[in-house]
Image: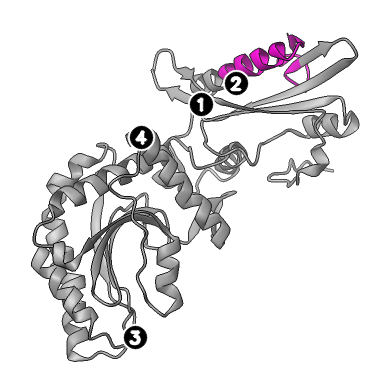
Amino acid sequence: MRDTLAHICRLQTKYSSSNTPEMKERGHLIRHELAQELRDRLPNLQKAFDGVFDDLEVEGSDGIGRKTEAPWVRLFSKAMSPNAREGFYLVIHFAANGSAVYFTVGCGSTVWSRGDLRAISDEELIRRTAWARSVIEQRWKTLSPYHDQIVLGAHAPLPRTFEKATAIALRVPVGSLITADLDAVLFGAAERLGEVYIAQLEQRDVSQGDQDANEVASIARPLTPHRRSQGFGFTASERKAVELRAMKLATEYLKGKGYQCHDTSSTESFDLLATQPGDELKIEVKGTTSDLCDSILMTKNEVELHRNEKGATGLVIVSKIKLIRDPEEPRAEGGSVEVLLHWDIDQWSTEPIAFQVSRA
């Protein structure tokens, strides 16, 4: 593999957007030689992933039509990343001037949201890659050795998009290809991709509102196929475990602020009645396994309550709850608490995701 990588780097110095003999040779190396060398390593690389990811594939591209300055080869789960525009994957990039090879984990430019795919803005792309880095840092406590900045040095817009879509990278100078342990570099990157995939199946990259919206969509359209990348979903007992964990942490927080708390979740359109001298608040509690907490799902009655009694309500979101999936008794641990007392719901946007349609 090191000879193939070095050869591609030499051909990078002869880049042309036309299909010159050098670019034909580079295309063959990218799409066939290097891709096949990665396929040959799949039995070992598979060990870096949970057994559920049994659909690993490899593909390479040097441009469609006109040749690109930044060819690539990627390793991916077909379910988690059905094409290079979606999901996360391990990808090998090359500096435009042939000076280095980058071993990276990056993502595509679209994201699953509210039952559909939409384009990712630069801001969201930054957030997505930051989320992947946080998952990796939680597992390994560091990004090292995949902490290099990726600078392809290309002039076209697409390679700059590749840079923005990179979560982690390890730069191997072309002169170090002879001595670098490339199989160890590949395996380490694959392990980190596998950790990101598991986090996605746990829906840690999907806010609580979008998790619930996807479940509503699956009920409204039961025949619509759902990809594995949309997550495992939750059983009733697992959801209850998450909700109980959120209620526990919300109650502890409010009591720490001097409130007395009464659980009203089974009888009212809010979860906790929090009182202290001169202040009474109706609290909505939302719990999620997601690392994100920028949207929630609320019923019509809940929304009306918070609008009609604005100033006398509150919202507690408990994110990053760790679900222990025990078939007999699921448990939930951890959680990060965000509290909005005297919450103004109209500072948030509301969007209908389903309608009850009745005969007139």
Residue 63 % position (x, y): 32, 78
Q: CA distance from mark 2 to mark 3?
A: 53 Å
Residue under label 1, please give it.
321
Task: Give, as a three-letter code, the residue at label 2.
Answer: Ala
Q: Is residue 358 shown left or right of residue 69?
A: right
Please, is residue 356 above or below residue 90 in the view?
A: above
Please report contact status of discs 1 and 3: CB closer than 8 Å, yes or no: no
From this viewpoint, is residue 1 visible? Answer: no
For marks 1 and 2, give the CA distance.
Answer: 8 Å
Q: Which amino acid, mark 1? A: Ile
Sequence-earlier tag: 2 or 3 = 3
- Residue 115 is one of the magenta-drawn residues: no
Q: Earlier in the sequence, mark 1 or mark 2?
A: 2
Q: Position of residue 190 (x, y in %)?
A: 25, 47
Q: The magenta stretch spans which residues? A: 243-272
Q: Answer with mark 4 or mark 1, whichever residue precedes in sequence.
A: 4
Residue at position x 14%, y 51% in the image: 183
Could you say whether the residue bearing mark 2 is in a helix, strand or loop?
helix
| 272 with respect to 75 (left or right) | right
Rounded to the nearest angstrom, the CA distance separating label 4 from label 1 is 19 Å
> In the image, is residue 31 above or below residue 20?
above
Viewer-nearest of discs 3 and 4? 4
Q: Position of residue 49 (x, y in %)?
A: 25, 40
- Disc 4 to disc 2, C-alpha distance: 26 Å
Of marks 3 and 4, which one's residue comes earlier in the chain?
3
Label 1, secondary structure: give it.
loop
Write down the residue under mark 4: 141
Q: Quadrant of residue 264?
A: top right
Disc 3 marks which residue?
66
Mark 1 residue crowding within 10 angstroms, few (<14) / some (14–19) / many (20+): many
Instruction: Give the tally of numbered discs.
Output: 4
Q: For mark 2, what is the residue?
A: 246
